[in-house]
Image (cartoon, rainbow, N blue to C red):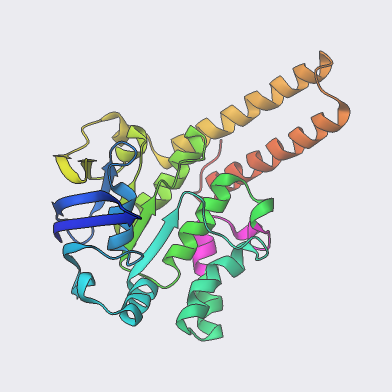
Amino acid sequence: MVKDLVKVYRIGTLEIQALRGLSMKVEEGEMVAIIGPSGSGKTTLLNILGGLDRATAGYVKVFDTEVTSLTPDELVEYRRRMVGHIFQTMNLIPTLTAAENIELPMIALGVPKSKRVRRVEELINIVGLRERRNHKPGELSGGEQQRVAIAAALANDPPLILADEPTGELDTATARLVVDYLSRANRELGKTVIMVTHDPAVARAAGRILRIQDGIIRADLEPLWPELATTTYADILRMRIDEVERQLVELEDELRRGELTGEQYVERQMALKRALSVFKEELHRFGMVH
């Protein structure tokens, strides 16, 4: 629950009021999207909910924890145990593998090694990246990196997942895959998910949409797009496979027309075939064929 939340930033003599008495309520187990223009207070709200920033005034209670009254040390413990953060920039450590990035939050919490190993295996399977577990972020696609970030956010089994523009740098099809994983965390793992997004298509995956403007909630909406109910995860995977196969055909045409060097062709073909393999493996994992 958030009540009368105010956040004021001061830069020299300049005062900026990011939140102006914002109030909202999210039920345990809900998936809620927060939309609004740039500068409306979306990220500020998420940062206060997640214990990354302090409110100037107002009240925030997350489950049984009154966040606005926590000491700095208590906030650190709150962030580690209660909240999984997912950012647009992924925040993965570039020198660590996917598995090591997922393990990192558990190391910070002091989880024993044997338990960490089991949990990493479980999460790697949940996000469908078993074959990519030893790859570093620079060797993964944007969608794969974000799935690692989701697994890392789930590592300590927090009840609350906060996602700040989790699909902002992804193409439409890959963004849908990432949102599906967030939806599954909500439906299958019982996580409360609060997601900031500028993309209406992403917001529609939530059970409720809150529109924020000028630092307050202006509207509380239910997404009424029935076409979403008929688009399954398997459908999205098949569409992505069709798209990659089409790109492979176009690549052949570009080579024949002399628009690519042999080196460029091989590099792009390998990247596309790698993506195609990932999507087909994922479809196979669900017991389906293309």
Left or right? Give the position of 165 relative to 140: left
Q: Is residue 68 above or below residue 87?
A: below
| Highlighted range, magenta | 122-136
Left or right? Give the position of 136 relative to 199: right
Left or right? Give the position of 74 relative to 23: right
Extreme residue in the front direction? 13
Quarter of the N terminus within the rendering: bottom left
**Is residue 215 or residue 62 the one in the foreground?**
215
Answer yes or no: is residue 30 visible. yes
Residue shown at the point (45%, 69%) measured from the top left:
155
Left or right? Give the position of 73 relative to 124: left
**Is residue 120 or residue 125 the one in the foreground?**
120
**Is residue 159 or residue 212 the one in the foreground?**
212
Residue shown at the point (49%, 79%) measured from the top left:
108
Answer yes or no: is residue 186 visible. no
Count the marks: how many? 0
Residue 89: image location, x then y, percent: 51, 51
- Magenta stretch encompasses residue 149: no
Extreme residue in the right direction? 262
Extreme residue in the top direction? 257
Residue 260: image location, x then y, percent: 81, 22
Residue 231: image location, x then y, percent: 37, 34
- Magenta stretch encompasses residue 133: yes
Q: Is residue 110 above or below residue 68?
A: below
What is the quadrant of residue 199 in the picture?
A: top left
Quarter of the C terminus within the rendering: top right
Residue shown at the point (25%, 55%) measured from the top left:
8
